Image (cartoon, rainbow, N blue to C red):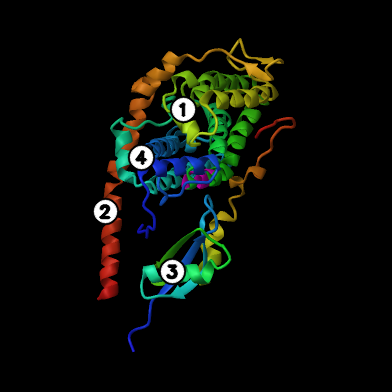
Amino acid sequence: MSKEWPLWEVFIRSKQGLNHKHVGSLRAADAKMAIENARDVYTRRSEGISIWVVESNSVHANDPADADAYFEPSDTKIYRHPTFYDVPDGVKHM
Amino acid sequence: METYTMSNFNNEELEKRFQEKIDKEIKIEPNDWMPDAYRKNLIRQISQHAHSEVVGMLPEGNWITRAPNLRRKAVLLAKVQDEAGHGLYLYSACETLGADREQTIDDMHDGKAKYSSIFNYPAVTWADMGAIGWLVDGAAIMNQVALCRTSYGPYARAMVKICKEESFHQRQGFEILTTLCKGTEQQKAMAQDALNRFWWPSLMMFGPSDSDSPHSAQSIKWKIKRFTNDELRQQFVDAAAPQADILGLTIPDANLKWNEARQHYDFSEINWDEFWQVLEGNGPCNKERIAARKAAKENGQWVREAATTYAEKRALRKTA
């Protein structure tokens, strides 16, 4: 048997103006086939108007085991949020 | 990005369909057909917007080490950090149109591309950090809220993210001024002085008057802009005037007053000569700003080279 087809991650834009969102993955011999298969699998009920496919081994990610420490620095920076500031009574449009 | 096309219409038909989409409020996305002039106009506007975010870090960065306390310092640092991020989102949106990021930056350095004229004014006192947050970010937000509905998808999405993040910028500026205005006579005078210097340049941020704005009509038709420069400027004055009253400060315009019939504030004509002078490169800080940006690029060159070399080494080690 020939080698296994690569895995592809599928991203769908549900309508113009919105981001493509990751919806799942599939196997296909090449990008063209991956897009066609994604259409057949992931947009059967008009879920999308645009498809991106990316080979799964092109996706790099942070180590989930370290996630707590990795994202901790932003937890203490409450001054990045507007609710941190006192706005005097009567001030509008701010 | 590689695309697989299925249709082939002539230009006239494509342009008709393009305008129909715009009229129906359907966003244009990177791989969609678009007129060359639409693409060029967007690259110009988005890259200028990106440059403004980046150059905008300079007047405030100048005060980080001299903020009056640790809280103010952390806040100012967070704000400047946001501006860098906003520059990045915008350069990325620009790249979806096929623009080359480094080229657009070099165009600014060579004076071929502009950035917001406001950043050519110096920030000389701590109160300026307040005035910049309140007025400059206030004006930018006014403009950017409108751009959340711009017709180009990646630009609109970047704007949504930027507006959400920027909501604290104006508040922190207003808070600085509130504190100064409740302080000593001298502190309040410092706040008034900052308002005196930043009021008119802030109104100029909305660009030339509609009658002198060469790109405006087409930009409105393509829904790149949703409001004209003068409409946004009026909105800004209407929002800021009562805010100045609450601070107990006086806006430096003898003609500023509420017009009951128009339901808007009237205000004096802008000194357009000053506007064009600053835009042409003759403002108080134009040369300093460009020199700082060029120096940042040149002095950072070895860091980028080192990172590339390190990445190559790591890739080699992996394959070895």
Q: Secondary structure at mark 3?
A: helix
Mark-to-mark CA distance, 3 and 4: 30 Å
Tell me if mark 3 has few (under 14), some (14-19) or many (20+) residues whose alpha carbon lies within 10 angstroms of its own: few
Q: Secondary structure at mark 2?
A: helix
- Pointer 1 residue: B216
User: Is residue B2 visible in the rendered structure shown here?
Assistant: yes
**Chain part drawn in magenta:** B154-159
Outermost residue, right side: A89
The C terminus of chain B sits in image quarter: bottom left
Residue B287 vertical position relative to residue B106 in the rendered view, above or below:
above
On the image, the x and y values in percent for residue B298 come to: 27, 42
Judge from the rendering whether residue B105 lies leftward or rightward of residue B213; answer left or right: left
- Pointer 2 residue: B305
Q: Of the residues under marks 1 and 2, which one precedes in the sequence? A: 1
Which chain is indicated by disc 4?
B
Q: Nearer the viewer, residue B190 or B319?
A: B319
Tell me if mark 2 has few (under 14), some (14-19) or many (20+) residues whose alpha carbon lies within 10 angstroms of its own: few
Q: Nearer the viewer, mark 3 or mark 2?
A: 3
Amino acid type shown at disc 3: Glu
Residue B213 vertical position relative to residue B49 in the rendered view, above or below:
above
User: Is residue A63 visible in the rendered structure shown here?
Assistant: no
Which of the numbered marks, if any, corresponds to residue A43?
none
